[in-house]
Image (cartoon, rainbow, N blue to C red):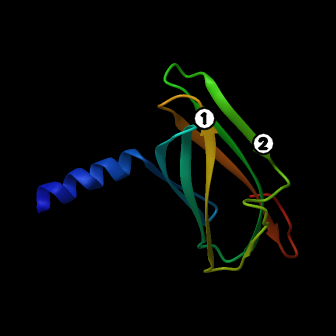
Amino acid sequence: GCLRLLEDTIKLNEKSSITETDGIVVAGISQYQNFPKGYSFVYKIRFDNRSDRTVKILGRHIICYGEKNEILANVVALNDGVVGQQPTLKPGEAFEYCSYVPLHVPKAFMSASFQLQEIGPRERYV
């Protein structure tokens, strides 16, 4: 019961990340999957707008690293949004998406950054 839940929570924490910048909370969880034609780094990202400003998600930069810190994939899409969208989040709104990066090795880790723009009278990048 409790011990199993603790083990599952530890595993989840090893595969997840959460950060906040200017009231925008970005949470991610990932899973590495083995498919017949190779491996995929599958991830889910959630944006929560806890600020009092409206923001637009403009793009992303994702890097997957191998066990020896070598770059396996470098996805730069700074004006392409996320999964083909550039969602606008008003205060209190959230947006989440799932995606993947195909890889050729059985283990990897990911680093991601996102480009957001404040919408309104004081437009600026967050």
The location of residue 61, given as percent across then percent down, is: 72, 44
Tag 1 secondary structure: strand
**Mark sitting earlier along the chain (1/2):** 2
Tell me where residue 98 sits by quadrant. Answer: bottom right
Q: Is 116 situated left or right of 52 in this image? A: right
The residue that mark 1 highlights is 103
Q: Are marks 1 and 2 in contact (CB under 8 Å)?
A: no
Observer-nearest of 109 and 94:
109
Q: Is 10 situated left or right of 43 in this image? A: left
Type of amino acid under label 2: Val
Q: Residue at coordinates 78% horizontally, 42% vertically from top-left?
A: 76
**Up/down of 67 relative to 110, above or below:** above
Q: Residue 76, labelled with which disc?
A: 2
Q: Residues within 10 Å of mark 1 (few under 14, many from 20)?
A: many
Q: Residue at coordinates 82% horizontally, 49% vertically from top-left?
A: 78
The location of residue 65, given as percent across then percent down, is: 58, 30
Q: Which quarter of the rendering shows the N terminus?
A: bottom left
The location of residue 12, given as percent across then percent down, is: 36, 52
**Up/down of 26 relative to 7, above or below:** below
Q: Residue at coordinates 78% horizontally, 66% vertically from top-left?
A: 85
